[in-house]
Amino acid sequence: MKTIKSLILATLALAMVAPVFTACSDDDDKTVNNLVSEYEVNDKMVAEQKAKSKKDVAVLLVAFGSTWNNAFLAFDATKKAYEQAFPQADVYVSFSSDICINRASAGENTDDNGNIVRRDYYEPRYLLHAIGAAKYSKIYVQSLQVIPGEEFAAVVASVKKFMNNGYIASAHLDDKYLAQLEENEAVFLGMPLLSDPDNDVPEVAKQLNAIYNAEAKQGVVAFMGHGNPDTYDTFKANVRYTQLEEALQKYSPNYFVGTVDMPDNYKQDVMARMEAKGITSGKVYLHALMSIAGDHAHNDMAGEGDDYWTPMAPESEDVSWFEFFSHKNFDVNVPVVNKHPQGLLEQPTILNVWINHTKNAEFLEDAYHSMYPEE
């Protein structure tokens, strides 16, 4: 039997997200009680789904999350696509961001008719526990991240902790069941969209060009990804944005890929690369290089008006890409579908890359070794 517990390294430990407790107070017990409640809610929900479907395979999709209704609809469509691709499996969607979970539940945003929309999403740890409590015999965990960076490390941490039965004692799982999962190599990890530079990057570039080549013939097509700060550039994944731009420019010199959080690849750096190619005017089409179009797409990329423009600091993070390029005398366009920018999950050919990652997912231990090779 392969022992997963022996594989935990210091790098992974830094990525694990744990509840924050204050010094001894009554709040400690409340926090534990809340955790127990979350486990109970998910255990009941998953148990009812398994009893209804009578399926023995589970697919858990893990996204960072969002509070936008158009993003919720994108996750709904993604879940449906996975159910079609994996008819033998029950498919679940989780958010790794507590902030997104809480704000989605509180109804932070509205639909296009002005109605408040509330959605309940849960962290991977709760759904994984529920999947284990329901004793699915095979489990696929699929990251919906774009790059294998900081957020993906948190996905890996959640799965590792699940296999190590590392949550609170009152949510204790069946060790015999977990051992069987490990012995039968029954837990699989699906990689992010741009995990493999040799296969994923050229394939995604090919599909993006097929979608946007008509725009590239008219002007610049600039993709805005998220990126990680230097201190959180887990697995050195930021390089995928540079690699993707290089792959796209083999189709057209008008493709550029920037981010909101990767040093030396902000909107002003994209502008500098455009100027170096002699592009100083014309049309610019902006697209989100993110799984869904949420706050970053609507505000950091597409935000219009004085709230998104700071004349004294045009390179500030408070200035949107729309306003930045508009004030550089470009004709800026943000293509929308049903009034919103689109995320990558809404592009069927790009979604299919994720689906293929799930179909080709590695056994957890093998996937872990590929990211943390032993010296």
Image (spheres, helix red, strand yellow):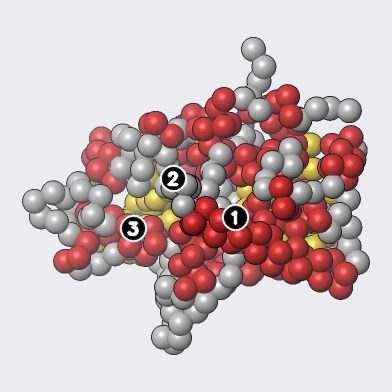
Q: Would you name the residue on which mark 2 appears?
A: 23
Within the image, what quadrant is residue 59 found in? bottom right
Give the residue drawn at x 54%, y 60%: 30
What amino acid is found at the position of numbered circle 2 in the picture? Ala
Choose mark 2 or mark 3, whichever is in front.
Answer: 2
Within 10 Å of disc 1 (Cα), the crowding (few <14, some 14-19, many 20+) is some
- The secondary element bearing badge 2 is classed as loop
Q: Is residue 17 left or right of residue 62?
A: left
What amino acid is found at the position of numbered circle 1 in the picture? Val
Compute the Cα span from label 2 to label 3.
41 Å
Choose mark 3 or mark 1, whichever is in front.
Answer: 1
Query: Considering only vertical position in the picture, is 301 above or below 19?
Result: below
Compute the Cα span from label 3 to label 1.
39 Å
- Which of the two residues, 314 or 18, is positioned nearer the viewer here? 18
Within 10 Å of disc 2 (Cα), the crowding (few <14, some 14-19, many 20+) is few
Earlier in the chain: of badge 1 and badge 2, it is 2
* Residue 224 seen in the current view: yes
What percent of the width, then of the height, locates residue 40?
Answer: 71, 64
What amino acid is found at the position of numbered circle 3 in the picture? Met
Give the residue drawn at x 49%, y 29%: 236
Q: Would you name the residue on which mark 1 appears?
A: 32
Choose mark 1 or mark 2, whichever is in front.
Answer: 2
Query: Considering only vertical position in the picture, is 333 above or below 262?
Result: below
Q: Would you name the residue on which mark 3 appears?
A: 301
- The secondary element bearing badge 1 is classed as helix
Give the residue drawn at x 72%, y 53%: 170
Compute the Cα span from label 1 to label 2.
14 Å
What percent of the width, then of the height, locates residue 365?
Answer: 75, 31
Within the image, what quadrant is residue 78 found in? bottom right
Give the residue drawn at x 46%, y 67%: 103
Within the image, what quadrant is residue 347 found in? bottom right
